[in-house]
Amino acid sequence: MNQLTLIWIALPFLLGFIIYLLPRLTRPLTLLAVFFSLGYGLALGTVTTPVSLRLLDHFGVSLFLDGLTSFFIVTNALVTMAVVLTVWESEQTPFFFAQLLILHGSVNVALASTDWISLYVALEVVGIAAFLLIAYPGTERVIWVGLRYLLVSNIAMLFYLVGAVLVYESHHGFDFVGLRVAPPEAVALLLLGLLVKGGIFVLGFWLPMTHASAAAPVSALLSGVVVKAAVLPLVRVALLVPAVEPIIRLLGVGTALLGVGYALFERDVKRMLAWSTTSQMGFILAAPEVGGFYALTHGLVKAALFLGAGQLPSRDLTELQQRGIPRYLGIPLGLASFSISGFPLLAGFGAKVLTMQNLRPWQEWAMTGAAVGTATIYAGVFFLPWTQAETRLPRGLGWGLGLLLGGLWVANGVYYEAFTVANVIKPLVIIGVGWGLYWGIVRRLREHLPAFGEQLEHLLGMMSVGLVVLFGLAWGW
């Protein structure tokens, strides 16, 4: 398995380079790399002994892959595969597919890394590849949004790098477990970098504009995969360092509520989906030990929603309520909305049940409120009227959506124990309450929450405030 792991890490980068030499094989080579990644992720899920690799002793690379990692790897593979199928017949150049493979490979490295320096390198490459995909080809505004993302990301990672040095000073190594003996300022600095990259709580205010401004396939990658490259390390740290776990759980609750609160007031479909991504990252962090399954279901759902949103006749929900949407989009968007709301027979149901069962008592009411808010948000998508369309769903998009929605149905088997009467009733009640709130209140809302927090100077200022708060939390625990 060790040799297979090294091949899995190297293959996307190798094929990304070969694409420039053999441009006619661009699409098959991209699909080959993603298929291999999917096979590796599925095989890893069946292995009882985790894969652990260490190169160059304490100064080098430390990799650890287990069942938790396999969920994230499979998510990365399926979402990337769906994007490849969607753009298969488009005019995308080899540059796009090469960056897609670099992004895919660097996310894989980030998911496997358990030392701070390897993770730093992987996340930096993720940021650069994501920026190139956001900005190419794009208008001046899209390029500015991409540069804004890159600037915020790089500044956050400078703080992170200082934290990694402090861990080495205390632990004489860069392993995650070194955080147990590191000073509070190291904890604060490292968490700051990961929270910004993962779009968590107020440190993730960069996320809505970035995800909403990118092209639909890129938005699917950003929300379905890229933010999880920083979320899994947060989950891993919460499991390895007991003193940090309460901080991660608290941030998870706050993120879930914050994202829902903003999404309820959004009338732009893509911005609403982006704020929902923020909220769903909170669900993963609120119950770290089962966050892998929730990450899988969210990645499939959000990729399907963003890909479908790219075909809508308008991004304005109010306008769509009047005009309606084509039936061929209404069905997949409705199924995805069902899953993320926790409706039975789709994997989102099992993920929600498993998450709720692993919450601490102090989290339960807040996360139930976030679940109700999620159902309310997606009622706005589910209840959009359908129209008869003269055109058909693009073939590539149909294959991509079919893959994602089929994955949601197959993933039901991961936690089939969820299908009990008691477990089914609670999500249905939550969905019913959410739908009632939508029809009674939210559908009529026309107010918008202020977006000043998304301005660049406020994003940078929030990092300073966040660092102080994180230091206080780390000091207290």
Image (cartoon, rainbow, N blue to C red):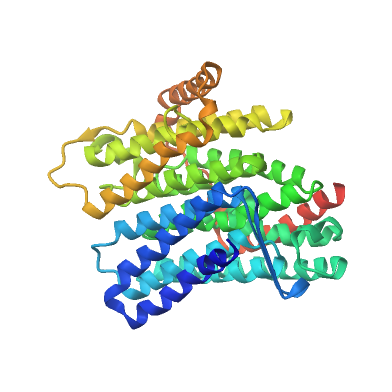
Question: Is 445 placed above or below 454 here?
Answer: above
Left-right relation of 161 to 201 = right
Occupied quadrant, residue 261: top right
Position of 213 with respect to 68 (left or right) is left
Q: Quadrant of residue 258?
A: top right
Q: Does residue 308 appear in this view?
A: no
Q: Is residue 105 visible?
A: yes
At horizontal 54% and vertical 46% (from top left) the residue drawn is: 295
Position in image of residue 188 (x %, y %): 77, 58
Q: Position of residue 106 (x, y in %)?
A: 53, 67
Which residue is depicted at the point 66% across and 49% down? 235
User: Is 391 located above or below residue 139 in the figure?
Assistant: above
Look at the picture and state if 292 lies above or below 465.
above
Residue 162, quarter of picture: bottom right
On the image, the x and y values in percent for residue 126 come to: 53, 67
Q: Nearer the viewer, residue 229 or 145?
A: 229
Comparing 55 with 26, the one in front is 55
